[in-house]
Image (cartoon, helix red, strand yellow):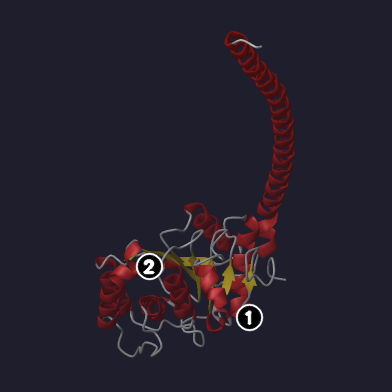
């Protein structure tokens, strides 16, 4: 007969054997698991390295292409805007580098920038919409009638600035007197809607509106409608934005999605690149010929550049 002591020893031995088995089994499993995780980590690191190498190679190719475009830009656009005048409008999101490069290429094309006007945050946001409407209504030059369809602040502001800063497309003459132009612009500047330096802005035949990567909220639609309204007053307008401007609620995206706007207004979605700057100048020339297009690499672009 088994004594109580022997029974207890047997049970203890069984539990001890189970404990040893669990420890040994978990040790083997842990080694296998760690080995598998190590292999997976090495595979992922290898994939990341390969992808990074591909990105680096593509960046080098992009830089080389951009360098080439920059080197030949002057030759490509040379003479396309000879004796033509351009008024430049910028939004708060516009890159100074993109603006300077585009302005420089207009000059290389033989054109003359007659002035640069900055639209402020108060202009491109809905917060100052009521005040902007009231300001525009009070300074409309005599003999100028704003479009009946211009009811939003972007369209109304663009219609007014187009009337005082764009030359008549038929006669190439100013559409307002210098006094009327000064009153309209000074009033808009006093209201905090635009910025410019005194004595530096004169009317032009064409307009270039430069914006940034993207415009959140209502900024994109306001800028797009502003550019479209300016376009109706002169010989042509190009809306040029940085990469991303043709996506989401960006100004270029809004312009391209509206057939009534894109039918007359040209857009460029990569003005931060030399290729986009070339497209911008060539598109200005196309506008003089009565042709519009959507250029770049973003959604809605009809071609990389002007053919």
Q: Which residue is mark 1?
A: 291
Helix, strand or loop for disc 1: loop
- Placement of 190 over or under 1, stated as above or below: below
Marks 1, 2: nearer the viewer: 2
- The residue lying at 47 percent from left, 53 percent from top is 96
Corner quadrant of residue 77? bottom right
Res. 183 visible in picture: no
- The residue lying at 66 percent from left, 20 percent from top is 18
- N-term-proximal mark, 1 vs 2: 2
Q: CA distance from mark 1 to mark 2?
A: 28 Å
Q: Position of residue 36 (x, y in %)?
A: 73, 30
Q: Closer to the camera, 87 or 223?
A: 223
Q: Closer to the camera, 136 or 2?
A: 2
Res. 220 visible in picture: yes
Side (left or right) of 281 relative to 129? right
Side (left or right) of 227 relative to 75? left
Side (left or right) of 85 relative to 175? right
Query: Disc number at residue 137?
Result: none
Corner quadrant of residue 288? bottom right
How packed is label 1: few (under 14 Cα within 10 Å), some, or many (20 or more)? some
Q: Closer to the camera, 75 or 141?
A: 141
Q: Which image quadrant: the N terminus?
A: top right
Helix, strand or loop for disc 2: helix
Question: Do tag 1 and tag 2 residues touch (Cβ < 8 Å)?
Answer: no
Q: Position of residue 162 (x, y in %)?
A: 42, 78
- The residue lying at 45 percent from left, 63 percent from top is 215
- The residue lying at 42 percent from left, 67 percent from top is 219
Q: Closer to the camera, 43 or 51?
A: 43
- Placement of 220 over or under 45, stated as above or below: below
Q: Which residue is mark 2?
A: 124
């Amino acid at each position: 007969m088994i004594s109580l002591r022997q029974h207890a020893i047997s049970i203890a031995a069984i539990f001890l054997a189970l404990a040893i088995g669990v420890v040994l089994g978990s040790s083997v499993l842990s080694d296998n698991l760690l080995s598998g995780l190590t292999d997976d980590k090495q595979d992922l690191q290898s994939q990341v390295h390969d992808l990074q190498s591909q990105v680096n190679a593509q960046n080098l190719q992009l830089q080389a292409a951009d360098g080439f475009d920059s080197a030949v830009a002057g030759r490509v656009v040379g003479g396309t805007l000879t004796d033509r005048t351009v008024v430049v409008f910028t939004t708060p999101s516009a890159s100074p580098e993109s603006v300077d490069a585009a302005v420089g290429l207009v000059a290389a094309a033989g054109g003359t920038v007659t002035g640069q006007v900055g639209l402020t945050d108060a202009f491109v946001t809905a917060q100052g919409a009521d005040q902007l409407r009231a300001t525009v209504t009070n300074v409309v030059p005599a003999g100028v009638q704003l479009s009946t369809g211009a009811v939003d602040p972007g369209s109304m502001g663009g219609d007014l600035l187009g009337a005082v800063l764009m030359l008549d497309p038929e006669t190439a003459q100013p559409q307002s007197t210098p006094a009327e132009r000064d009153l309209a612009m000074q009033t808009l500047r006093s209201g905090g809607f635009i910025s410019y330096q005194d004595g530096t802005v004169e009317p032009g035949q064409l307009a270039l509106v430069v914006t940034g990567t993207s415009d959140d909220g209502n900024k994109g639609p306001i800028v797009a409608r502003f550019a479209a309204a300016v376009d109706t007053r002169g010989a042509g307008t190009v809306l040029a934005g940085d990469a991303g401007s043709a996506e989401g609620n960006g100004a270029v995206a809004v312009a391209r999605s509206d057939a009534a706007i894109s039918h007359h207004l040209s857009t460029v979605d990569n003005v931060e690149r030399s290729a986009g700057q070339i497209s911008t100048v060539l598109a200005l020339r196309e506008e003089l010929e009565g042709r519009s297009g959507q250029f770049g690499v973003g959604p809605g672009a009809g071609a990389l550049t002007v053919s």
